[in-house]
Amino acid sequence: MSDTQTDRKVRPNKPKGVVVIDRDRCKGCGFCVEFCPTGVLALSEQLNGKGYHPPEAVAPDKCTGCGLCGMYCPDFAIFGYRPDKRASEVD
Amino acid sequence: MTAVVNPVEPLLRIERIPHIWCPGCGIGTTVNCFARALSESPDIDLDKLVVVSGIGCTGRVAGYLRLDSFHTTHGRPIPFATGMKLANPELKVVVYSGDGDLIAIGGNHFIHAARRNIELTVICVNNFNYAMTGGQVGPTTPATAVGTTAPYGVYERPFNLPYLAASCGAVYVARWTAYHVRQLAKSMKEALHKRGFTFIEIVTPCPTLYERRNRLGDGLTRMRFYKDNSVIDHDADLRSLDLGFEGKIICGRFVNIERPSLIEAMDTRLADKLGPKYRPIGEGT
Amino acid sequence: MKADPRGVLTGAYYIDGNHACCEGAIAAGCRFVAGYPITPSTEIVERIAARFPAVGGVFIQMEDEIASSIAIAGAAWAGKKAMTVSSGPGISLMMEHVGFAAMTETPCVFVNVQRGGPSTGLPTLPGQADMMQARWGSHGDYGIIALSPTSPQECFDLVIDAFNLAERYRVPVFMMMDECVGHMTEKVLIPPANQIEVEARRFTDLPPEQYSPYRPGDDLVPDIVKAGDGYRIHITGLTHDERGYPVISADCQDGLVRRLVGKINRNADRIIRVVEDDVEQADVIVVSYGITARVALRPIELARRDGIKVGHLRLVTVWPFPQQRIRELAERIKAFVVPELNLGQVVLEVERCAGGQCRTIPVDHAGGTVHDPDRIYRAILEGVK
């Protein structure tokens, strides 16, 4: 057995990804919720300043940092990333 | 600890966000794909990348991009871009505009640019109507759909854009929907790296107008529709790519051929005829 | 700066106005032309097509005049001096893009070899009936500059001025030729390149962080950049602020549009060129331009032989119009006589500026040929009564 497999048994799943939400930019279209492949998101009960229900991460540990939410968002209000890859870092 | 930003943001004029597009509109989604295509293209110098738009909702894309960007007249981004590219071949020029702008009023320029194979990437967001002006029908509106200028339903046959582009000589022709974000980003990247006239049609929702007036649901409903009703077939016969009112949407990369670009053909011919006397346009001229 | 000698065909030639115009454009540094065939202008682009490849220019025959007129804007924003060429019907098609160039302050030259109009009119015969169109043809408020050559030599000289004015004021400039000067063959002297002054594009020396595309200088004209230099500009035909961003408000509109008109009006003294002959003591002044100025020479000579004190004011620039000069002269004379190959266009400006202080006598002509000099002579006689 490899070390990696042993690790998985011993340690709980750590989220590989982080989702960042700009609640005020959101217009509640629902694309991110729909197309997140692991079901991280749901529209929240709260309203933002524009009167929309922005998403919230209801299952953040399922986030893989795939970035699909960000690709779909027409309002540039959400994105995902992998902290270990730090792909979208800005100096 | 350095800040992590949305990967699309370095490409945007952030001071102009929020944009004017409606909730559930697909244009912003296509912009994310464009940003992804560029981020995966380190060989493209963003200082030399120019975006040219026409008039309409998609025409507003130029104004939100932090690149040299030109918001020109209705129907005319392609000839503007042609002049720019010929005058400085080192620029990489992208035309980003809508179905009405590029194919109705701009139709003549579209077919000639494809014929000439001028090196341009033309991104055509097709939401089946003239959205900015309130939802009039256009040359891509499917038969029987309604719009403000066809209140009893369209009885004209719409264009089949990939077929049109291919028949005029485009060297790269693809169609995706706003649902196909990964494929679209990949297509944009391919088109940007291809020499010649490259064309991508992107079927997107217009929830406020086309979708609402035709009772097709909101943006999310339509994205689900695209997911469930689109078929990817790169080898599809171009003639079969018509889009009906509620039918199948065939997506894919239908054409990917090689032929000399306009500038290549011009340089070859003029060098052949004039020999060393030929001076291509450049800095010193 | 001096003209690039590689583009200057120094020498003495016997050529027509169209050919001279082509050479003038090349001497001025024009290196992009987009055009479409239309009589009586076509020879200009034909010669351009033949000459450009050896001087580093690009010519493209576009699919129509609308495409031509915006392709030159694209080329201008890529940093090149650009020109298009047409006649009545084509110029009408181009009008939206004259407005676009004015609104975005894009330097470029529009050559109109005028023919009989309206509509298809008289393709092979002269007219001067597009003069008001040059000034007002596109929608909205904006200013332009228009020059009117009277000979093939001036077709060479004035197109260089047209390019220089376009650069200095970041404005579309019209070369108002006509079929007669365009197809007339005369001696044209092309001087050595070091005797030809060309205006460099007023590129900014500010770095991108400090530059605003539409922040004007003291002359009301902003410095310019070109695509590809890292300035990441946004240029739009919408009403815009100094950053170039659309601002849909009455305030922004007022500021912008007043400046677009003002930059021509306030600099009018430096733009206007007229050629005056014996106007100081005149009782009657003939105001003319283009080919008609040639035709007017003979009746003026005859009238002078009759003892009439008649002066000649030839408009080299028709727009901006020399309002001040006309106003001054109107106080002292009995009449202006204004012959034109149209049914009264520039004469309306003369009359307006004369303000009723003297008579204004039009000598109109529907076009198709030049005036019978006798009609102009009779108008002069009428003017001194």
Image (cartoon, rainbow, N blue to C red):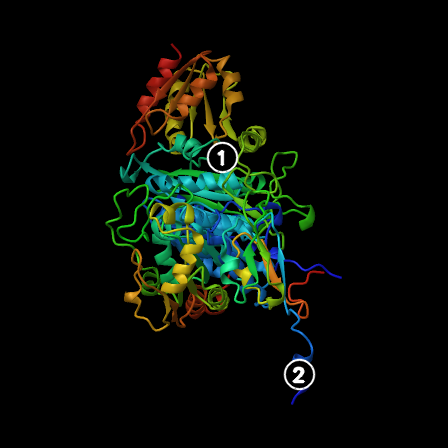
CA–CA distance in space, label 1 to label 2: 74 Å
Front residue of C231 and A43: A43
Chain name for mark 1: C
Chain name for mark 2: A
Q: Quadrant of residue B165?
A: bottom left
- Quarter containing the C terminus of chain C: top left
Q: Label 2 crowding class (10 Å Cα cut-off): few <14, some 14-19, many 20+?
A: few
Instruction: Give the residue pinned by disc 2.
Output: A4
Q: Quadrant of residue C131?
A: top left
Please say if C297 is above or below C236.
Answer: above
Secondary structure under tag 1 reads: loop
The mark found on residue C144 in the picture is 1
Secondary structure under tag 2 reads: helix
Q: Amino acid at mark 1?
A: Ile
Q: Amino acid at mark 2?
A: Thr
Q: Quadrant of residue B16?
A: top right
Q: Position of residue C102 (x, y in %)?
A: 50, 38
Residue ranking furthest to the right: B1
Q: Is residue C229 visible?
A: no
Q: Position of residue A66 (x, y in %)?
A: 57, 67
Q: Label 1 crowding class (10 Å Cα cut-off): few <14, some 14-19, many 20+?
A: many
Q: Position of residue B114 (x, y in %)?
A: 38, 61
Q: Position of residue C117 (x, y in %)?
A: 30, 35
Please say if C212 is above or below B28.
Answer: above
Residue ranking furthest to the bottom: A1
